Amino acid sequence: MARLKAFDEGQAVDAAVDCFWAHGYGATSVRDLADCMGIGGASLYNAFGDKRTLFVRCLERYANRSSRERMARLEEKHPPKDAIRAFLLEIVERSLKDRDCKGCLLVNSALDVGPHDAAIGAAVAAYLDEIRGFFRRNIEAARRAGTVPRGIDAETVSGHLLGVLMGIRALARVKPERKLLESVARPALALLEPKRRLN
Amino acid sequence: MARLKAFDEGQAVDAAVDCFWAHGYGATSVRDLADCMGIGGASLYNAFGDKRTLFVRCLERYANRSSRERMARLEEKHPPKDAIRAFLLEIVERSLKDRDCKGCLLVNSALDVGPHDAAIGAAVAAYLDEIRGFFRRNIEAARRAGTVPRGIDAETVSGHLLGVLMGIRALARVKPERKLLESVARPALALLEPKRRLN
DNA sequence: AGAATTCTGTAGCGGCCGATCCAGAATCAT
DNA sequence: ATGATTCTGGATCGGCCGCTACAGAATTCT
């Protein structure tokens, strides 16, 4: 009935994610996007609506391919307490390997887009809730398994871990130093260990 | 020898701080700045150079009036351990009262300006080091005073507190909820308390 | 083949951007 | 008063912004 799209939408969105991720929402122009997606401006608007709509789609894509993928992978491979530990340590490693300090698209968006756009802010908040859910779920499973102190409060500790995660992501963008980032993570992980106080 | 400035530079910079703080560096136009500073564009360029130079000056002003002021005030009024506690709790309260979620100019800049401008990134990193210095200094003083566990490692805990601080500031911009922010802060403060595990 | 529909490249819209120019107003030293 | 110097408002610069209009290319149906 009609002409076919000459590009793959999925690949195009992936390219757009990289573009937004590297420069931030505001500093990314529609021409930047079209260029790195390998399509013309008209095709972009035809396929994705406008810049903001494309960004919302990029957030979802990013959540699926980065955040949710990591949670599912670690939850499958590790027992609950180790999954939490591996999550935080993987973020530290990623932040250190991230030479141009792009950080995390969700955390970046939480700071510079969320507060100025209610719908995007709510979406970002929902993604962060998913991460907190990962922490809470695994804390509770670990408590049932007896691998974390019995008196642990999943509500408090999951919130703490989410805050620590965002702190690591934020700090890493201007001070990507292993010792520093590990010092942020370690006391939080120590909450999951029995009695010993090591710091 | 020449005509006098018709405005007060200090007041003008304060207004510029508010403007950058509310909208972010990139989203603030020179016209926005001139308007809320109450001066014309020519005067702005004449007195402050260009937009970026003005921003650097705003960062310094902000650090003096917000971050350094708070550290000095709390350090004077409280014994070391209480100063740390009061610092974090004050940030939580400020974040909750901050209806339009402006957050902290330094933290915001750490995420969206720092990584794309080396000089500004280094400046922001230096301001963050000052805050970590506040934590470290007070941890060590508290240890000498015997009000924190003897085995505490000031290097690790000061890093952790800095990360937690940034996490609170970041989280508060999309999820300004008391229970959540307090759950981020409380386990960090518990590191300063003896034996008991309350998380 | 031809009609109908959708995609694509190009050109262009009005609008704002950071920055500069310039003429005139204000101040000081002489 | 006069000249030197600096500040100020307003106009303006080239350039990029998000977005759209439009004509033609590509595809499927009849």
Image: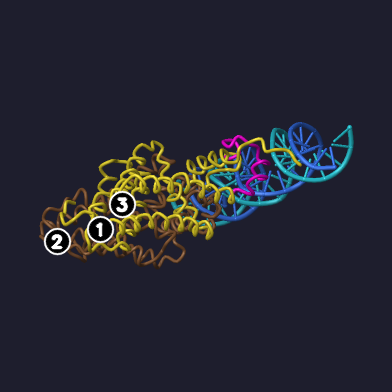
Chain colours: A brown, B yellow, C blue, D cyan
Which stretch appears magenta?
A: B33-51
The residue positioned 60% from the left and 43% from the top of the image is: B30
Q: Quadrant of the C terminus of chain A?
A: bottom left
Q: Main secondary structure of the magenta part?
A: helix
Question: Which residue position is annotated with label 1?
Answer: A188
- Estimate the x, y position of residue A93 in percent, counting from the top left: 34, 67
- Mark 3 lies on residue: B80
Q: Is residue B188 rendered magenta in the image?
A: no
Which tag is nearer the camera, tag 3 or tag 2? 3
- Where residue B50 appears, as percent x and y from the top left, is 63, 49
Structural crowding at the residue carrying mark 2, measured as other residues with C-alpha within 10 Å and reported as few (<14), some (14–19) or many (≥20) = few
Q: Are marks 2 and 1 in contact (CB under 8 Å)?
A: no
Q: Which residue is mark 2?
A: A195
Name the amino acid, label 1.
Answer: Ala
Against A173, residue B82 (above or below) is above
Q: SS at mark 2?
A: loop
* Residue in view at x 12 percent, y 53 percent: A151
Q: Is residue B197 visible?
A: yes
